[in-house]
Image (spheres, rainbow, N blue to C red):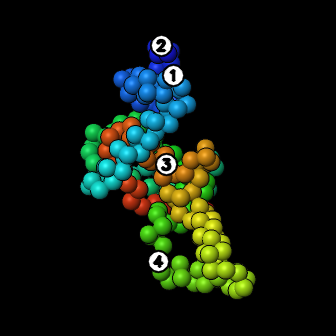
């Protein structure tokens, strides 16, 4: 199948990948744009995973103040270089994350940030609601579901992205890592609400 410039352009708009990467993905996918997009996403995820251990000592503090000035957030997002911190993509990511904090009210950045003295009583509470006569495998599956729901509600990186609930916040960050080529980490955030 012939790969046209229009197909490459469409795939670039969809994924943000480079022209040559889009052309190669379309060739490998035999012109199937959806399949090529999936291939590029997987490639981006692999690239992001390789960068996960790299130090993030630069970055920016972003903010979002909701209409009416009753709710606001501050968020620190780190990257590897000052150059990337000044890019429009990075600054847009910070704005999106600050809006996420205002809208979705997370308590923690990542699952590992939940203190044991919060998590253990929570697990005990979940166990007490599960019928003791169920098989251990079923109990574990129910517990995993209840914990997953708790994480989605309270952990920023696990929350569904407010503008596209098919994505988690961590997927949004991973896509930006793949695009910018540097590790990106959310360090901390604060949410302020009048009377809250």
Q: Secondary structure at mark 3?
A: helix
Q: Nearer the viewer, residue 52 or 154?
A: 52
Residue 39, label in figure: none
CA gap between label 1 and label 3 equals 26 Å
Q: Residues within 10 Å of mark 1 (few under 14, many from 20)?
A: some
Classify residue 153 as left or right of residue 63.
Answer: right
Residues tagged 2 and 4 counted as in contact (Cβ below 8 A): no
Number of the label disc, if any, that sits on residue 171: 3
How far across and down, in percent of the image, does residue 190 sit? 48, 62
Residue at the image point whose x is 50% and y is 83% from the top: 117
Q: Nearer the viewer, mark 2 or mark 4?
A: 2
First in sequence: mark 4 or mark 1?
A: 1
Report whether residue 48 is seen: yes
User: Is disc 2 placed on a helix, strand or loop?
Assistant: loop
| Residue annotated with mark 1 | 31
Q: Residue at x 46, y 64 (%)?
A: 110
| Residue 2, numbered circle | 2
- CB of mark 2 within 8 Å of CB of mark 1? yes
Locate residue 57 relative to residue 195 in the image: left or right: left
Residue placed most toward the observer, 105 or 118: 118
Q: Nearer the viewer, residue 91 or 35?
A: 35
Image height of 14 relative to 164, above or below: above
Percent x, y for residue 82?
27, 43
Of labels 3 and 2, earlier in sequence is: 2
* Neighbours of disc 4 within 10 Å: few (<14), some (14-19), many (20+): few
Which residue is at a point 48% across and 28% down the rendered structure image? Answer: 29
Real-space Cα distance between discs 4 and 1?
49 Å
């Amino acid at each position: 199948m012939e790969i046209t410039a229009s197909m490459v352009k469409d795939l670039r708009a969809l994924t943000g990948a480079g022209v040559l990467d889009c052309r190669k993905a379309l060739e490998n996918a035999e012109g199937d744009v959806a399949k090529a997009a999936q291939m590029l996403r997987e490639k981006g995820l692999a690239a992001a995973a390789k960068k996960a251990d790299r130090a993030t000592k630069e970055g920016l503090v972003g903010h979002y103040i909701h209409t009416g000035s009753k709710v606001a957030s501050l968020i620190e997002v780190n990257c590897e270089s000052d150059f990337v911190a000044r890019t429009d993509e990075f600054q847009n990511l910070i704005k999106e994350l600050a809006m996420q904090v205002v809208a979705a009210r997370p308590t923690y950045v990542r699952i590992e940030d939940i203190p044991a003295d919060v998590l253990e009583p929570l697990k005990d509470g979940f166990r007490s609601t599960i019928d003791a006569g169920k098989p251990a495998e079923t109990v574990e599956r129910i517990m995993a579901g209840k914990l997953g729901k708790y994480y989605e509600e309270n952990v920023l990186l696990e929350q569904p992205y407010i503008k596209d609930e098919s994505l988690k916040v961590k997927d949004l960050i991973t896509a930006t890592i793949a695009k910018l080529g540097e590790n990106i980490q959310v360090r901390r955030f604060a949410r302020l609400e009048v009377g809250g």
